[in-house]
Amino acid sequence: MDHPRNPIARTVAFCDRFGLRLPILLAPMSGACPPSLSIAVANAGGLGACGALMMSSDSLGEWVGEFRAGTNGPFQINLWIPDPPPARDLAREAAVRQFLAQFGPTPDVESAGLPDFGEQCEALLAAAPLVASSVMGLFPPAFVARLKAAGIAWFATATTVAEAKAAEAAGADAIIAQGMEAGGHRGCFDASRAELDLVGLVALVPAVADAVNIPVVAAGAIADGRGVAAALALGASAVQIGTGFLRCPEADIHPAWAGALARAAPEGTMLTRAFSGRAGRGLATRYTRAASAPDAPAPAPYPVQRGLTAAMRRAAAADGDVERMQAWAGQAAALARAEPAGDVARSLWADAQELLGAVP
Ligand SMILES: Cc1cc2nc3c(=O)[nH]c(=O)nc-3n(C[C@H](O)[C@H](O)[C@H](O)COP(=O)(O)O)c2cc1C
């Protein structure tokens, strides 16, 4: 498929194909994407998003029911492709527990259980969203065939050109190109590469757009009209925004986290494995800085580390202490606006159109 060279024409073609009025996708954010946020973005003409990583079939069904009661707009459901079972290292886990004890309670028995991926896939098919998105790998071929038969588009997250090409070959309908600036977990197919393959969005988007024949959605530190316009000029057909929506009232994140986002310089965020065992970008805090010190124990693999830190994360939320909270943030966190999400989505697109020389 040939994509128009003109950014506006390319964006319009994408929006027409997927029934959107704005080329703005809410990022799926596990733990931070209540239906209210998606309803606001979908009603403004963008794509809502359910980050279903931690959801059982029942909770996924409830999310979809609530979303559909608030809008007849479109949405994506996002699933993490499971990693192979982690290698356990009890000595390392004991060292992590000891380290964590400086920051709060540690669990007697870690609770790292994740919902069953096969059941999540069935619940996704039953929910019939416009889009199913993958992260951390590719959907299995049999599931891709069932998505296609059901008319559900597959958007695959990629952090490198090689991942994007593999996703296209496996049948993806669009690539979500996630730059290393992005808030939350990095979507690397191989978890061990997360700190090695650090590709920024300005290099990733044109390289992926040149390498594949399917539309590219840019994700990572896009939070105002300048970022949207730049991503589209680089070759994207749309953008996916996470942190830029986190201060909206509908996101309902902890006020301490929302307040800290407003104060975060780009260099005030860092990649860390210290919350889950997989690398993600969050605010540089007392805990994340200490955990990256040379004398700190290496985190356990995903999802063991997630279980080990669960009690500390709960205590931090109860205390309103952002220094120990799992406070994911992209490098453009300070641009996030504390305004209704629909207004944010509409004004991002209006500003981008003006910058691109199109009259909104
Ligand atoms: C709080 C939070 C949770 C996230 N959870 C997920 C997730 O469950 N699945 C996923 O594919 N991406 C997840 N992401 C990454 C986003 O999809 C997206 O790549 C990122 O938000 C883009 O960067 P930005 O936050 O700078 O806009 C998450 C991001 C944040 C900020």
Image (cartoon, rainbow, N blue to C red):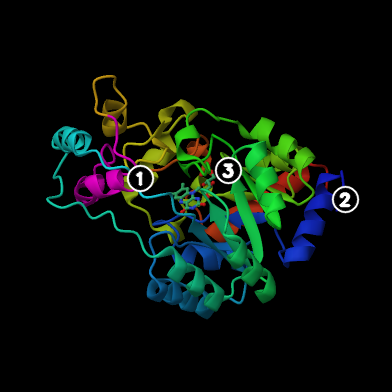
Chain-order first, disc 2 or disc 3? 2
Task: Give the labeled residue for mark 3.
Answer: 223
Spatial separation of the CA atoms under disc 2 and disc 3: 28 Å
The span picked out in magenta is: 298-326
Three-letter amino acid code of the residue under disc 1 = Tyr
Three-letter amino acid code of the residue under disc 2 = Asp
Horizontal relation, residue 287 to residue 302: left or right: left
Residue at image x 29%, y 35%?
299
Instruction: Mark 1: give few (<14), some (14-19) or many (20+) Cα within 10 Å.
Output: many
Q: Is residue 198 visible?
A: yes
Horizontal relation, residue 247 to residue 23: left or right: left
Whether residue 162 is in magenta: the answer is no
Instruction: Mark 2: give few (<14), some (14-19) or many (20+) Cα within 10 Å.
Output: few
Report the disc number at residue 99. Answer: none
Q: Mark 3 CB in 8 Å range of ligand 1?
A: yes
Three-letter amino acid code of the residue under disc 3 = Ala
Compared to residue 249, the image places residue 244 above or below, namely above
Task: Give the labeled residue for mark 1.
Answer: 302
Report the disc number at residue 2. Answer: 2
